[in-house]
Image (spheres, rainbow, N blue to C red):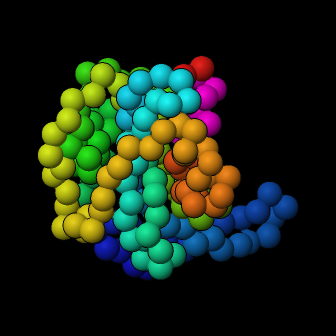
């Protein structure tokens, strides 16, 4: 029904388990990678976050570096994570650890994401795309992150879920 370089929208007809027919609108987007770049340990450990304008909300939002490959191309999650971290923050990591799988909005979209922990970080210059020109990056301590989630200042569901994965991994 609709396509652009970032997504397609389709309408499917299907048969319900009870036999009736239905329709379902689905947003197809490529899988994404999300990266928690962690420097240090304990409550004062720092995590790199990015802030950018999110058009559907009409707001600037803080989140962990994350994204998809251009033009709806599918990439290996680990390769995409390396690309997104470097692109959005300039950071490169010597150590990577998968944290888990995230479904963005399974009632609406086919998009899934993989969260990664990046440590042993090396600074560099961001290589942002034109659509990320207004992005800024900043270190946030874990305790500040938690305070900002509680205060409703960080609301990105994927970032909050990835942080929960980090905690469940005992990190």
- Image coordinates of residue 123 in percent, x first then y, are 20, 35
Q: Is residue 27 left or right of residue 65?
A: right
- Image coordinates of residue 118 in percent, x first then y, are 36, 29
**Residue 26 in view in this figure:** yes
Q: Nearer the viewer, residue 120 or 14?
A: 120
Quarter in which the C terminus is drawn: top right
Q: Nearer the viewer, residue 113 or 126?
A: 126
**Residue 32 in view in this figure:** no
Q: Is residue 144 left or right of residue 31?
A: right
User: Which residue: 38% across, 29% down?
Assistant: 39
- The answer to whether 161 is drawn above or below residue 9 in the figure is above
Quarter in which the N terminus is drawn: bottom left
In the picture as drawn, the residue positioned furthest to the right comes out as 18
- Based on the displayed image, in which of its 4 quarters is residue 97 positioned? top left
Q: Nearer the viewer, residue 133 or 152?
A: 152
User: Which residue: 71% across, 64% down?
Assistant: 15
- The answer to whether 38 is drawn above or below residue 54 in the figure is above
Q: Is residue 11 left or right of residue 68?
A: right
- Image coordinates of residue 64 in percent, x first then y, are 43, 47
- Based on the displayed image, in which of its 4 quarters is residue 3 positioned? bottom left
What's drawn in magenta, residue-wise?
162-169
User: Which residue: 46% across, 58% down?
Assistant: 62
- Based on the displayed image, in which of its 4 quarters is residue 155 positioned? bottom right
Q: Is the stretch drawn in magenta largely helix, strand or loop?
A: helix
The reply to whether the magenta stretch includes residue 168 is: yes
């Amino acid at each position: 029904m609709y396509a652009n370089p970032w997504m397609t929208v389709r309408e499917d007809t299907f048969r319900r388990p009870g036999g009736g027919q239905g329709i379902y609108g689905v947003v197809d987007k490529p899988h994404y990678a999300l990266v928690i770049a962690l420097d240090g340990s304990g409550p004062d450990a720092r995590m790199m976050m990015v802030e950018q304008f999110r058009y559907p909300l009409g707001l600037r939002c803080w989140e962990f570096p994350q994204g998809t490959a251009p033009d709806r191309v599918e990439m290996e999650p680990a390769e995409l994570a390396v690309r997104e971290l470097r692109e959005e923050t300039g950071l490169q990591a010597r150590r990577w650890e998968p944290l888990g799988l995230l479904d963005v909005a399974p009632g609406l979209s086919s998009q899934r994401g993989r969260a990664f922990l990046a440590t042993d970080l090396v600074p560099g210059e961001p290589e942002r795309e034109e659509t990320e020109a207004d992005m800024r990056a900043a270190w946030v301590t874990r305790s500040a992150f938690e305070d900002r989630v509680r205060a409703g200042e960080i609301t990105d569901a994927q970032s909050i879920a990835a942080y929960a994965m980090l905690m469940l991994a005992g990190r």
